[in-house]
Image (cartoon, helix red, strand yellow):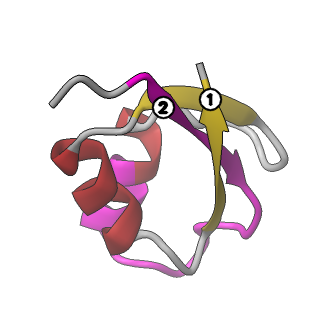
Amino acid sequence: MASNKKLRITYSCSSIGVKVDQKDTVRRLGLRKLGQTVEHDDTPVVRGMIHKVRHLVTVEEVDA
């Protein structure tokens, strides 16, 4: 998969009151503060992590 696409992930909703594994997933995506944005390669692993915390983040696809 020669993917030159990236995903721009923004931490948009607080993780207070959610399950510990979802909090850990947000941290593993590299998100620490509300409103923070990170970019990751578009891979199945990252897509799965985003799916798990889709109610806490907003995602947009960007060309690398």
Quadrant of residue 4 within the rendered picture: top left
Q: Position of residue 42 (x, y in %)?
A: 37, 38
Tag 1: amino acid: Asp
Tag 2: amino acid: Lys
27 relative position to 16: left or right: left
From the image, which quarter does the C terminus lie in? Answer: top right
Q: Which residue is mark 1?
A: 63
Q: Residues within 10 Å of mark 2 (few under 14, many from 20)?
A: some
23 relative position to 63: left or right: left
- Are discs 1 and 2 less than 8 Å apart at CB? yes
Which secondary structure, mark 2? strand
Q: Which residues are magenta?
A: 4-25
Q: Residues within 10 Å of mark 1 (few under 14, many from 20)?
A: few
Q: Position of residue 20 (x, y in %)?
A: 31, 65
**Farthest residue in the right direction?**
35
Residue 8 vs residue 63, the one in the foreground: 63
